[in-house]
Image: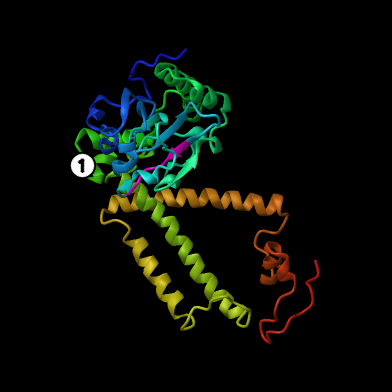
Amino acid sequence: MIDIIQGHDPYASSKKEIIIVPKQPLMVQHAQDYEFLDYRAYGISHFYRFRVTPEMLEKATIVPDGTVDIIFRCGQDRLDVTCYGAVLKMHTIDYASIFHLDDNIFGIRFLPGKAFLPGGYPIGSLTESSIPFTEICRDQAMMEVITRSSDFKEQIQLFLDAYIPDYQNYYNPGTRPFSYSMVDEITKVDGIINVNELSHTIDGIMALINATGLSTTSPLSFLILTGVIFWMVAYIVTHLNVLVLRKRLPKAPRTFKVPFGPVIPIIGSIGIVWMIYNISSDPATRTTIYAICGIIFAALTVYATIWVKKVMKLKLFKPIPLEKVMSMENDLYHVYRNPKTGDHIPKLEK
């Protein structure tokens, strides 16, 4: 059995987070027989249970607190478990449609920003919404036993016995989730921290870049600027594609046609080149970014060369008709329009 006493292992929350106590006071004050168990580990804030009263259904209010809840209706003939995401505005109790008069409720409340759902289900998709827990949790037996039980400690133990192994299997053993480290650092200073300071204090890829000396500025800024280079190169290629296709297939059917001919692609390409040249005001950082991008592009070039010669079995620099390239992507292009007349022509010979 898993010990339900609060622990501070690699997945647990820092003691500083005791300042965050998301307990929905405008609901709790109207609940009957409310009790809770502080846990603060594995992303869980606390467990709670209560009985729904007429006053709760009439007066209770749900306030935004950035947390996720899993709520069980206990003592029912059928399984009724719902996962509620974070709310962005105040709601009446009607928002939580799972509550009915005299219901016995058992719930799990997660720490803000640290909720983990079975299989890593994205909590962002639950913002201002809910989902039946049975749709994301495969452990039907666990849910049924919790629903039938009236023992608070037993319900907690049953949930943890199923939840913690799933949590540990999802994350690498002994590795603290990256998002947890970010929340920890922000919490330690009560939210008063800038991006550069945060990037220097958290673990992960940015810390690795900083440790290897690849950046003379903040690791976070360095990582972003390096990624931006790749996006801008992709945009330059897109602009060149527009110019080539406008020249070679002037009458091909298009869902949208860039106005003013080649003017916009040319201006866009010049602007992007200028931004790449001025990617950083620090010459050393700029040089390092260029070097890393060059290494990655070289590796991609080697990979593409092997793919073209060995997999596609084509000559490396032999031009391929544009129409044939299109036909590789979509069979509909086997019937295409003549670039000069706009008329359909027969299917290409393979």
Disc 1 element: loop
Q: Position of residue 114 (x, y in %)?
A: 37, 35
> Which residue is at 50% across, 52% downward?
297
Q: Position of residue 94 (x, y in %)?
A: 38, 45
Q: Is residue 14 left or right of residue 204?
A: left
Q: Is residue 197 left or right of residue 57?
A: left
Residue 237 higher or lower than 60, as above or below: below
**Picture quadrant of residue 177:** top left
- Name the residue tied to disc 1: 193
Q: How is the image coloured?
A: rainbow
Q: Position of residue 186 (x, y in %)?
A: 25, 38
Dot 1 alpha-carbon crowd within 10 angstroms: few under 14, some 14 to 19, many 20 or more: few
Residue 89 higher or lower than 187, as above or below: below
> Which residue is at 49% across, 39% downward?
121
Residue 241 higher or lower than 123, as above or below: below
Residue 268 higher or lower than 4, as above or below: below
> Which residue is at 68% across, 84% downward?
342
